[in-house]
Image (cartoon, grey):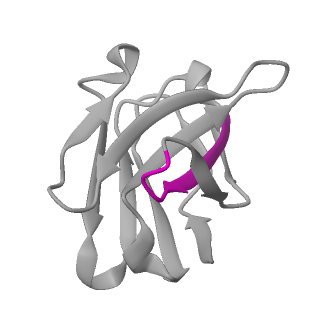
């Protein structure tokens, strides 16, 4: 089992930055890839970014490139999502998830709320 805990969300004005953290515990050696997802009210969950633990390769959704960056600290079993120049449309609950290499995200955190005011 893997446990994921997100932190770093909050209420910010447009144009500001936030860094989200996702701390993993448990059987972390089983994690192949971590991902950040977000879900705004009334909307479907969408993939924001992913990072592979063994080689650090990353993916960021095209619409977010240039503003969002994903990174990891293997020594802390933590994945980060740096969000710059935030916009009101970035308002959502952000979730961290972990994939054991099964092509599915098997573990999910409870989410952290990000609210961006105009």
Instruction: Please name whichever residue, 61 or 27, is drawn nearer the observer in this view of the structure.
Output: 27
Q: Predominant secondary structure in magenta?
A: strand
Quarter of the image where the N terminus is located: bottom right
Instruction: Please name whichever residue, 92 or 96, is drawn nearer the observer in this view of the structure.
Output: 96
Q: Is residue 75 above or below residue 113?
A: below
**Does residue 110 appear left or right of residue 27 in this picture?**
right
**Does residue 46 appear left or right of residue 39 in this picture?**
left
Q: Is residue 83 above or below residue 47?
A: below
Q: Is residue 110 magenta?
A: no
Q: Residue at x 49, y 49 (%)?
A: 102
Outermost residue toward the left in this view: 55
Q: Residue at x 39, y 50 (%)?
A: 81
Q: Is residue 21 above or below residue 60?
A: below
Residue 66 at x, y percent in the picture: 23, 25
Residue 71 at x, y percent in the picture: 26, 55
Q: Residue at x 77, y 18 (%)?
A: 43
Instruction: Please name whichever residue, 15 or 99, is drawn nearer the observer in this view of the structure.
Output: 99
Total marks in image: 0
Residue 30 at x, y percent in the picture: 43, 72
Quarter of the image where the C terminus is located: top right
Q: Which residues are magenta?
A: 92-102
Q: Residue at x 18, y 45 (%)?
A: 57
Outermost residue toward the top in this view: 63
Outermost residue toward the front in this view: 102
Q: Quadrant of residue 107?
A: bottom right
């Amino acid at each position: 089992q893997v446990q994921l805990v997100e932190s770093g969300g909050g209420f910010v004005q447009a144009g500001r930055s936030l860094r989200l953290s996702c701390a993993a515990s448990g059987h972390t050696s089983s994690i192949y890839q971590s991902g950040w997802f977000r879900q705004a009210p009334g909307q479907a969950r969408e993939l924001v970014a992913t990072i592979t633990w063994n080689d650090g390769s990353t993916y960021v959704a095209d619409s977010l490139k240039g503003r969002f960056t994903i990174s990891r600290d293997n020594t802390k079993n933590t994945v980060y999502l740096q969000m710059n120049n935030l916009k009101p449309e970035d308002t959502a609950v952000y979730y961290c998830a972990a994939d054991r290499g099964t092509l599915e995200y098997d573990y999910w955190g409870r989410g952290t709320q990000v609210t961006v005011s105009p």
